[in-house]
Amino acid sequence: SPLPPSHPHDLERALSLATRPAEDTFTEDEPPFRVLFVITTLSEYDRGTRGTTSGADRLKDLVLPLMVDGVASMVERGWHVDVYLICGFETLSESRREMITEALPDGVGFEAWDDAIPYFYEKKYNGNLKSDDQTIELASHGLARQHRFVVRDKLLDYDFFLAFEDDMRITADHVVNFLEMSVEIDRLARMAEESPDGKIDVPNAPEDRRRARGTSTDKASVGNDVVHDPMTAEQLRRLWPGFIRTEVLDTREL
């Protein structure tokens, strides 16, 4: 099927809002780029697992600095940013809320959903309950999916949603890079849609000198050695820009 036509809220418009000079957000009639930063955190204090110190203030010493650093980089661009914290612990006290709001840049809204872990019945591999008298349990593994409800409720209020776990440093540059790559993928998909063979080739691709091609290991119609092959519009529509997570070591400890 053909690609959908452009509309006022397409990728190009989002990228234009995100990359215009900060001073323009206060002089143009169009509102600023609106971003909701959703952060999911399981524990307020570290539990001593995965190399952490039991009882260490995770919220204050890890989550908050990363949150403020990322949000500040976005506010500096003139974006309107709000933060939504999804908590796996029972209560985010009023004093902790004040700590967060006071650390965030002026004009940044803050909401929190505490005690957000869903419930489930643990089941066997065949889908049956483990016992007839089984009780409902907290599903900590399901906390990472709770941001979907936040996005659903606020879908029409923002231009862009960020949803990450609590120890990720995400800045405005990451958002702009994601939008730029999304626009480029969309452009290529439209070019493929309009080309005679329905495909687009990699420009200036090196000559393929392979005598044999790899075979698929996942029942795909092509092998896993596809590097410079042409792509169809349908294939390009399946692509999403991604990030590679890197772990930062404190050199003072080395």
Image: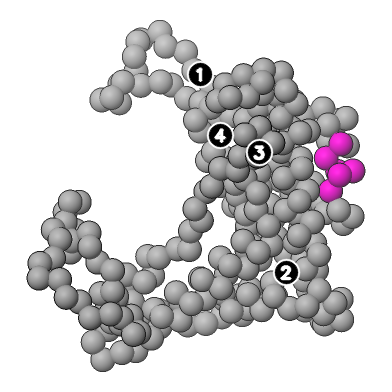
Colour convention: one colour
Q: How crowded is mark 3: few (under 14 residues within 10 Å), some or many (20 or more)?
A: few
* Mark 1, secondary structure of its residue: strand
Mark sitting on residue 137: 1
Res 33 label = 2
Residue at the image position 28 percent from the left and 80 percent from the top: 206
State how far apart marks 3 and 2 are (Cα).
34 Å
The quadrant of the image that shows the N terminus is bottom left
- Specify start and end residues of the magenta stretch as a single range: 99-104
x and y percent of residue 115 in the render? 66, 28
Quarter of the image holding residue 173?
A: bottom right
Secondary structure under the numbered disc 3 in the rendered image: loop
* Res. 80 image quadrant: bottom right
The C terminus lies in quadrant? top right
In the shown orientation, is residue 97 left or right of residue 206?
right
- At label 3, the amino acid type is Asp
Depth check, mark 1 against mark 2: the one in front is: 2
Circle on res. 212: none
Residue lying furthest bottom: 196
* Lower sequence index among marks 3 and 4: 4
Name the outermost residue toward the front: 254
**Dot 1 amino acid type:** Glu
> Does residue 98 appear in the picture of this structure?
yes
Image disc number at residue 250: 3
List the residue tagged with mark 4: 143
The dominant secondary structure in magenta is helix
Residue type marked 2: Phe
Are the residues flagged by discs 1 and 3 in contact, CB closer than 8 Å?
Answer: no
Label 2: few (<14), some or many (≥20) within 10 Å? many
Is residue 21 placed above or below 212 in the rendered structure? below
